[in-house]
Amino acid sequence: MVELRRKRDHYRRDDVVRAYDERRFGGPGGRWVDSVEQETIRSLLGRHGGLRLDLPCGSGRLFAGLDAEGGATIGGDSSLPMLRRALSRRNLVPVAALDAFQLPFADATFDAVVTLRFVFHLEDPQPFFVEVGRVLKPGGRFVFDALRYTPRALFPRLQAPLGGEAYAHGVCRISGLLGRTGFDVVDRRDVFLLPSQAYRPLPRPILAIARRLEPRLPAGARSKAFFAARLR
C-alpha cells in the first residue's frame, strides 16, 4: 500500500495532471492510441445502458464516448486536480473524489464499471475486483484493460512517469482473479503490437506500417488486453 499511496500523490501533482493527456496522447501516434482504447472500451461495453461508473476517470477523456452510448455516467478519482481537469471538458458528467478500494456507494448500485489504465498500477488487483463486484448489480459488466507485458519492468527509469512500478498481468492470471471474485469473462480484445507509450513519438510513415502489421500478427504478441466480465 505504500507504493499505491506514492502513486496517488504523484497523480495529485498539478504539473503531472497538466502534462497527462499530451504526454500520452499527443501527436498522431498518441491520438491513434487514444482512439483504439476508446473504441475498444465502447465495443466491449456495448449498449450496456443504465448507470455506469468510470473509475478512476482521470482527466475525463472517456466521458463523451460513454455518454454517446446512452445511460448515465459518474466519474470517480482520488485526485482532485484530475477531477478539475475532467470538469474543464464542459461535460455534464458528475464527478466524485473517492477511494477505489472503499467506494462510497451502496451494494449493487451500478449497471457497469469502466476502468482504463489503472490495473497495471496494482501488484494484486484482487481487492479492487472485489470492490467493483460489490457495487455492480448481478449481471453487471466490468470493462478494463491490463498489460500483458511491459519493458518498464526492465528499465526502472521508465517508471518515473507512472509514479511507481507498472505490473504486467497475464491473461490467465487476470481470468483466474476474475473467476475467484465472482466474474465470468465474456469477451476480450488484445491490442497494440508495441507498448502504447511507444507509439507517441513515431513518425507518420512508421506509425502507418505498425498499424498495418498489427492485425496480421498473433493476438498473443500484443502488449495490452481488454476484458469484459459479467458479475454472476
Image: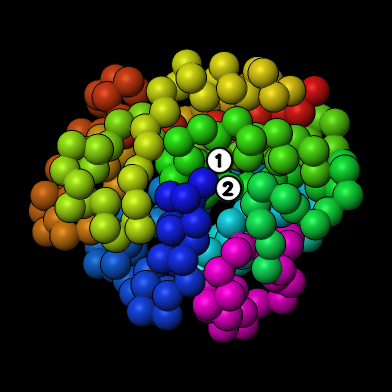
Residue interval drawn in magenta = 73-96
| Residue 149 in picture, x, y percent from top left | 30, 31
Q: Is residue 230 left or right of residue 166?
A: right
Observer-nearest of 115 and 63:
115
| Residue plotted at (71% across, 40% down) | 132
Placement of 136 over or under 197, stated as above or below: above
Residue 10: name its quadrant. bottom left
Q: Position of residue 1 (x, y in %)?
A: 51, 46
Q: Which mark is residue 115?
A: 2
User: Is 206 or 152 nearer to us in this picture?
Assistant: 152
Mark 1 or mark 2, which is nearer the start of the sequence? 2
Which picture quadrant has residue 229?
top right
Q: Identity of the amino acid at label 1?
A: Phe
Amino acid type indicated by mark 2: Thr
Position of 99 with respect to 121 (left or right) is: right
- Identify the image quadrant of residue 83: bottom right
> According to the image, label 1 marks what residue?
144
Q: Residues within 10 Å of mark 1 (few under 14, many from 20)?
A: many
Q: Quick one: SS at disc 2?
A: strand
Where is residue 114? Give x, y as percent.
63, 47
Determine the secondary structure under disc 1: strand
